[in-house]
Every structure is written in structure tokens, then in C-alpha cells.
């Protein structure tokens, strides 16, 4: 009898846990859908409502990670496959994730919101990708994360992001991160340049410039490319007159740092 009662209680706990996971996943999906609907340029447009549901979506991620990180991350991964405006990326070791979404408040200039989710040694925690420093600053879209391991066994992460100032004006940044003593090190320096070790490299790309108008349609992701087999990232050489060259500047991972490939 006691065994039967314990089995029944165990089943109820499992059922409630599954229901809670499903409910949180459904809430995230609903919040994101409502946010997009109220942001759209149609009869349902209402920016106050859009902001409300966008904030609920963000808060839902944060609370979901605290309650059940695995279920929340799985739900976000599925949602990102269905929604092209939601960027969801994870590193090979599963220690770092980035979630980014267009806040739908801009015109040709786009602004993004986002969260990092990383494991601090005890649990998964969240951290804003874009700390509030200037309310008028344009926030970037993190669109790629890659993991590498140094010769000393240290995991480091390569991040690609861009700021979209207009339909043809972008600023790209490649940077390195690491998790040190349970904290996300957003200033980790693993890029070796002529001026020494750096945390990031940035450059601007103006597709609308007269010298580039015959280049055809812009492929945003071509701004930064990572070749996993070679452990190299590259970006186009920009000539003095603004021409986007077909030649690319390459940096390769040499075991401890990325260095210029000559």
C-alpha cells in the first residue's frame, strides 16, 4: 500500500514538472508572438503592448532559466527555428548561450535586445548582452558563437555581432569571451594584433557607397565568416575609397590566440 502511494506521488510530481515545463515553453512562445503582432505595421500595431509583451518574454527567459534551464533552453531553440528574427546560439560544450531578438522599435536602423546564459559551475545564470549605458545607443545582434580550446585546456569563445545603422550600413565586431571563476569574462583577450592582445576587432561596411553599388545584394553574414576546419575567421578588406574588396583579412587560432594569417 505504502509503495503504491509513493509511486502515485512520484507520478504526480513528474506530471506537475512536465506541465510546468510545457507551460513555461508555451508562455515564451505566446509572449514572443504577441510582441511581434503588436509591433507589426497593421491594425494591431500598439507599441505600448509590444513593449509589455517583449518585457514579459525577457522576464520569462530569466525566470525559466532559474526554474528549469534545460527545458527553457530547449524551448528557445525550438522557437528560434520557427522565428527568423530570434537568434539562439550555443557553444559546443553547452556552457554558453546567446539569445538575441530585434526589438522592432527601429526603421532602417535596427536595435536588438539579448541575454547570455552561461554555467557558473553550479547552475545556469543569465546576464544582459547589452548593459544599459546610453538609452539612445544602438544595440548589436549577436549572430554566431564558436568554441575553441587552448593548449592548456582552457575553453574560449568567439563571438560575431553587428550593429545595423541602416539597410546597407553595418558595423561588425568579432570578440572573445571566457568563463573564469564562475563569471563571464566579456573582456577576455585572445586576439593578437600589431598593437598587442585585444578583446575585439571592429570594422564598418557601407554597402550603399557608390563604389559598392554594383556588388549585388548584401549578405549580412558575409561580414564575418568562420571556417571551423581551419579555425580561422575572416572579414573583407576595405580599401581607402570604401570599396569592399573580394580579398579577406584572416585570423587563425594558433593554440592560445588568434593571429593574423600572412
Image: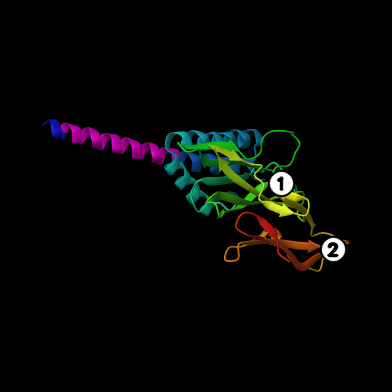
Local crowd size for mark 2, using a 10 Å CA cut-off: few (<14), some (14–19), many (≥20) = few
Q: Along the horizontal axis of the image, is 219 left or right of 157? A: right
Q: Which mark is residue 239?
A: 2
> How far across and how far down the image is residue 5, in percent?
17, 31
Local crowd size for mark 1, using a 10 Å CA cut-off: few (<14), some (14–19), many (≥20) = some
- Magenta-tinted stretch: 5-24
Outermost residue toward the right in this view: 241
Vertical order, 249 against 139 (above or below): below
Q: Along the horizontal axis of the image, is 10 left or right of 63? A: left
- For residue 24, say whether it is visible: yes
Outermost residue toward the left in this view: 1
Q: Quadrant of residue 36?
A: top right
Main secondary-structure element of the magenta-colored stretch: helix
Does the magenta-highlighted stretch encompass residue 21? yes
The residue beneath circle 1 is 110
Disc 1 versus disc 2: nearer the observer: 2
> How far across and how far down the image is residue 34, in percent?
55, 40
Q: Nearer the viewer, residue 125 or 27?
A: 125
> How far across and how far down the image is residue 244, in percent?
80, 64
- For residue 220, say whether it is visible: no
Amino acid at each position: 500500500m505504502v509503495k503504491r502511494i509513493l509511486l502515485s506521488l512520484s507520478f504526480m510530481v513528474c506530471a506537475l514538472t512536465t506541465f510546468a515545463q510545457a507551460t513555461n515553453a508555451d508562455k515564451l512562445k505566446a509572449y514572443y508572438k504577441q510582441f511581434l503582432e503588436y509591433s507589426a505595421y497593421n491594425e494591431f500595431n500598439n507599441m505600448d503592448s509590444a513593449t509589455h509583451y517583449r518585457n514579459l518574454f525577457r522576464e520569462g527567459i530569466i525566470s525559466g532559466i532559474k526554474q528549469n534551464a534545460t527545458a527553457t533552453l530547449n524551448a528557445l531553440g525550438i522557437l528560434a527555428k520557427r522565428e527568423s528574427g530570434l537568434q539562439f546560439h550555443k557553444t559546443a560544450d553547452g556552457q554558453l548561450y546567446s539569445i538575441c531578438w530585434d526589438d522592432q522599435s527601429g526603421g532602417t536602423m535596427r536595435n536588438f535586445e539579448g541575454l547570455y546564459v552561461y554555467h557558473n559551475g553550479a547552475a545556469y545564470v543569465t546576464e544582459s548582452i547589452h548593459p544599459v549605458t546610453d538609452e539612445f545607443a544602438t544595440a548589436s545582434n549577436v549572430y554566431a558563437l564558436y568554441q575553441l580550446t587552448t593548449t592548456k585546456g582552457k575553453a574560449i569563445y568567439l563571438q560575431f555581432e553587428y550593429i545595423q545603422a541602416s539597410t546597407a550600413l553595418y558595423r561588425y565586431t568579432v570578440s572573445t569571451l571566457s568563463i573564469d571563476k564562475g563569471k563571464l569574462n566579456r573582456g577576455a583577450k585572445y586576439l593578437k594584433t600589431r598593437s598587442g592582445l585585444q578583446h575585439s576587432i571592429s570594422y564598418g561596411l557601407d554597402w550603399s557607397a557608390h563604389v559598392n553599388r554594383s556588388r549585388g545584394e548584401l549578405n549580412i553574414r558575409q561580414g564575418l565568416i568562420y571556417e571551423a576546419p581551419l579555425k580561422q575567421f575572416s572579414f573583407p578588406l576595405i580599401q581607402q575609397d570604401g570599396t569592399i574588396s573580394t580579398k579577406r583579412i584572416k585570423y587563425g587560432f594558433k593554440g592560445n590566440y588568434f593571429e593574423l594569417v600572412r
